[in-house]
Image (cartoon, rainbow, N blue to C red):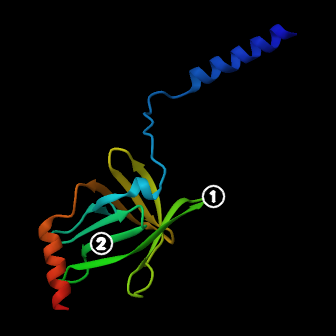
Amino acid sequence: MKNIFKLMALFAFLFCLTSCDDDEPVIPTLEVTPANLNGTWELSEWNGAPLAEGTYCYITFNRKEQTFEMYQKFDSMYARYITGNFSIEADPYLGSIISGDYDFGNGDWNNKYIVTDLLESGSMIWTAKDDENDVNKYIRCDKVPEEIIAEAKIDEDEN
C-alpha cells in the first residue's frame, strides 16, 4: 500500500513538472509599502501613451512621514507644487490601494489607486480604483529636475 502512495506522489510530481510552463518568466514584484515607494517617481505613461510635450508629473514620497511632494503640469499652462499625506491600505480583493490628501485643507486626491507591478527595476502601475481605464505608469528617477522645481515655485509665487 505504501508503494502505491509513493507511486501516486511521484506521478503527481512528474505531472506538475511537465505541465508547468517555464517559458513565462516570472518577474518578482515588491510589496507596496511606504519604504518601497520612498523616493522620486516620474509619470511616464498615462493610459498607455507617453505624456504630451510640455506636461509632466513628479511625485516624491517620504516613507517616514508618509508625506509627498508633487510637481505637475497637466491641465493648465502653469506648473503646480502640491504637498500632502498619503496612505496605503490592503484590500483583500484588489490588493494595495494608495490614497492621499492635500495640505492646507484642499481635499483628497481625485482617485484612490490600485498599485500593481511595483518592480525592483523601478516602475509601477497605478489604476484608478473606480475607473479601470485610468492607468498610470511611473518610473523611479533620482530627483525632480531643477528647472521643473524652479518653474513650479515661480508659478506658485505668482498665483
Amino acid under disc 1: Pro
Q: In the figure, is residue 33 to the left or right of 123? A: right
Q: Disc 1 designates what residue? A: 92
Real-space CA distance between mark 2 and mark 1, rounded to the nearest whole angstrom: 29 Å
Point out the tag, 2 or 1, that comes first from the N-terminus.
2
Label 2 or label 1, whichever lies nearer to me, is: 2
Q: Nearer the viewer, residue 74 or 31?
A: 31
Question: Picture coordinates of residue 56 (x, y %)?
Answer: 22, 69
Please give the label number shown on residue 70: 2
Q: Residue 72, located in which quarter of the rendered image? A: bottom left
Question: Picture coordinates of residue 24 (x, y %)?
Answer: 44, 33
Q: Residue at x 20, y 85 (%)?
A: 156
Amino acid under disc 2: Met
Q: Residue furthest right?
A: 1
Q: Residue at x 43, y 50 (%)?
A: 117
Q: From the viewer's perspective, is residue 22 above or below residue 51?
A: above
